[in-house]
Image (cartoon, rainbow, N blue to C red):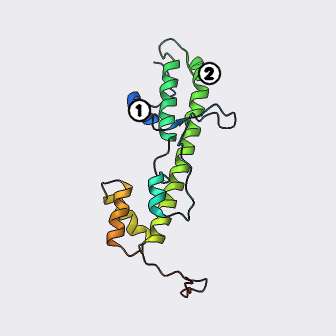
Amino acid sequence: MPFRFIREDAIKYPREVVEKHLLRFKPMNYNRFMWWRSHTDGNIPLSKKSPLKDRIENGDFGESSYKWQAQLALYNALDKVDLKTHSCHNQLEILQVDLARYKRLMEDFNKEESSRLESLYKSFTSKFQITKDDLIDLLCEWSGDLVSFYIYMCKNYDTNITKTNKRGRPKKIVK
């Protein structure tokens, strides 16, 4: 029985779906400091001081390309090796770069997604008077996209938050 270096459950999407999703992202030229990346999201995130709706429409909270790049790395690895003819040692030599690429892309994906999610939580909880737990509950029940969720929140939650100073007292608003 040949040894498999790629787990069966690691590939979650058909190749056509992966390639279709990667078409949304901008291909990168080779970068020796980020050699494992082949695509970039292509948009520059707006400032945290920008309006929340503008940040949502800009794609600041959207899905990163790393998951799709990682899936493509696994397909590229499978294309390079023949489990019937290559020995275990040869398979490892052939797959080393692709498996390292997959590992780094998944690390980047986990880091980027958690960062975007925390930024989303912080932005929504600061704009609307809602706790993080209530926001998570609402997001888990929501079936639409983030723009429609933002519109729902604007209609149903208060956005007039009084700014306070370090002592918790309301700031004087100078016009």
Query: Does residue 53 appear in this view?
Result: yes
Q: Residue at x 56, y 62 (%)?
A: 48
- Amino acid on which disc 2 is placed: Glu
Q: Quadrant of the N terminus?
A: top left
Q: Position of residue 170 (x, y in %)?
A: 53, 87
Closer to the chain start, of discs 1 and 2, is 1
Q: Which residue corresponds to the image point at 52% horizontal and 43% vertical from the top-left? A: 41
In the displayed structure, does residue 35 sit left or right of residue 85? right
Mark 1 lies on residue: 20
- Closest to the observer, 141 or 127: 127
Between 1 and 135, the one nearer to me in the picture: 135
> Where is residue 141, by image quadrant?
bottom left
- Residue found at the very far right of the displayed protein: 32
Identify residue type, mark 1: Lys
In this rendering, the answer to whether 115 lies above or below 49 is above
**Image coords of residue 82 (percent x, y):** 49, 15
| Crowd band around label 1 with a 10 angstrom C-alpha radius: few (<14), some (14–19), many (20+) | few
SS at mark 1 in the image: helix
Q: Residue furthest top?
A: 85
Rendered image: mark on residue 34 = none
Nearer to us: label 1 or label 2: 1
- Marks 1/2 in contact by CB < 8 Å: the verdict is no
Vertical comparison of 171 with 61: above or below = below
Residue 32, position as x, y percentages in the image = 69, 33
- Residue 93 badge: 2
**Front residue (pair 151, 110):** 151
SS under mark 2: helix
How many circles with numbers are drawn on the protein? 2
Instruction: Give the spatial CA distance, label 1 vs label 2.
Output: 30 Å
